[in-house]
Image (cartoon, rainbow, N blue to C red):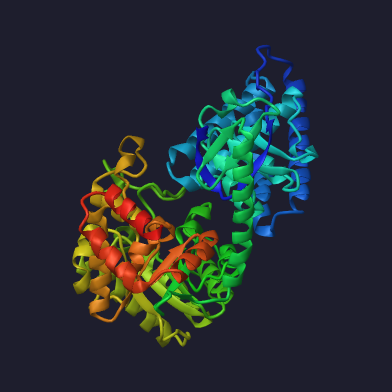
Amino acid sequence: MLKGIAASSGIAIGRAYKLQQPTIVLREDKGDTQEELALFERAITKTISDIEKVKARAAVSLSEDELAIFDAHLMMANDPELKAQIEDAIKNGENADRATKSVSDNMIAMFEGMGNEYFKERAADVKDVSYRLLCNILGLTIPDLGAIDEEVIVVAEDLTPSDTAQLNKQYCLGFATQIGGRTSHSAIMARSLEIPAIVGVKGIMDEVKDGDLLILDALDGKVILGPSDDEVKEYSAKRETFLKDREALKVLVDQKTVTVDGHEVDIAGNIGTPKDVEGVLNNGGEAVGLYRTEFLYMDSENDFPSEDEQFEAYKAVLEGMKGKKVVVRTLDIGGDKRLKYFTFPEEMNPFLGYRAIRLCLDRKDIFRAQLRALLRASVYGKLAIMFPMIATINEFKEAKGVFEEEKAKLISEGVKVSDEIEVGMMVEIPSSAVLADKFAEYADFFSIGTNDLIQYSMAADRMSEKVSYLYQPLNPSLLRLIKMAIDGAHKHGKWCGMCGEMAGDTLAAPVLLGLGLDEFSMSATSILPARKMVNSLSKKEMEELANEALEKETMEEVVELVKARLA
């Protein structure tokens, strides 16, 4: 058995289709410059044609929003700057393949050097396009996954977006890759196609041969090699149960989230762009609990997005949610999130430095433009605004003061603004959790950002593999901080939500319910399973569970406690 990361839930049983991509071997000889330029031009033309064909085939099973990845690939293949750099290298004596490899490697290194998931995905896009281009230069044939006409489990070193988009769910029962993570394009597309996927399965390319019988348990992240008849029978039954359960969840789309003893909470969705609204609504989300506006800024090519550009995006989300609440986080940039057009100061630890609200209060011109756009959009729906990385009372009061100033200016200009905008804050720094009862005198609500709260509480960079064992969402010390935030909000009649990964964690949900959390915000596909769980729990019993958890010494003890209670 091999272990990996469950990227798209489900169970598959079938024979392995081992994807062997052509190996790129660059030519040593340097051909005639004009011939190399002509070869490159033909390869570019074929690459664009190939991508268009893949997009057309993918259009059968993917939405317009999901097909946008191929528009990005086409834009890259048509990029005049990329083309000019490669042509210049050819004119300087390189052959077409070496020139392409050199230029694309530099671009990939640039994106990967930016360090966050968004830009790593851009690096993956460049790899995908440049690999296809190199194959076309060298006359290599890329395997056609769209031609698979029998049921298989695809096993690969990695799957590019182009690969994944060609998978026909009628024949591709699932896939397992040696590398990758939950946020990769292939994982996201697998969830869209609703096929089981496990990524990061070390050694799978060495252990599996074409035609081997496999069981893909993408609920627990396990790949079982050469299963026995009993294992096949066992997992066949598990698969049937999973499919029935998934279909049954759809009846919960229009239902409220209420415990067996009548306590109601909200299950909301996290989004990064206006196009994500559809997924939240289709999965029964009762609100948008976190709109990450930084993607507006990161997608902008040359400068900060204008007030009007932001207004259109915020308006689209508010209108799209049809009167349901939308909680917008103001610009949270810095740390591992960088901009191509803005130079951040060099810092020993940028996660603890010039970022989020600190940048906005220093550069109020940027902050005011965003607030004006949000205020103008507020009349199109139910808007709540929250400030990230708040550490002190004075920071929150200053940020809210800027909001009030811009609101007054717009009203004086005759611009309509909603009178019902809630203004709250993220609780992601221990100081704000400890002082939550004081913050709640000024803030309308809290949203706990557990990703940062955990790393700051444990003094452990969540991106570091060496200290990843300290990323402990159910550590009693963190649970006590969360309780302080919730109790502080409730003391003043304010609501408290959570928008970090922990909100969608099935082991954490019972404890958070018991601690009194009012809103759970998560990825859209986690909403219905979370609703089902909460609807099966007793608020009173979960309060008892939470009180017991707060008295434990280790995360492991809390996990065992929760598992025993759920069982």
Q: Nearer the viewer, residue 215 or 424?
A: 215
From this view, report whether residue 119 is shown above or below residue 91. Answer: below
Name the image quarter holding residue 320: bottom right
Whole-percent x, y for residue 422 in the image: 37, 78
* Quarter of the view holding residue 517: bottom left
Task: Identify the residue at image location x=62%, y=32%.
Answer: 156
Residue at image point 36% right, 51% down? 334
Residue at horizontal 33%, vertical 78%? 405
The quadrant in which residue 397 appears is bottom left
The residue drawn where x is 19% and y is 67% is 435
Q: Quadrant of the C terminus?
A: bottom left
Q: Is residue 391 visible?
A: no
Left/right placement of residue 169 relative to residue 292 reads: right
State the residue lying farthest toward the top: 29
Residue 214 horizontal/vertical position (percent): 63, 35
340 is higher (above) or lower (below) than 150: below
Q: In x, y percent, where is residue 86?
A: 64, 30
Q: Residue furthest front?
A: 230
Q: Which residue occupies the foreground of this view, 428 or 332? A: 428
Using the image, determine if residue 410 lies above or below residue 207.
Answer: below
Q: Is residue 174 left or right of residue 304?
A: right
Residue 46 lies, in percent from the top left, at 78, 35
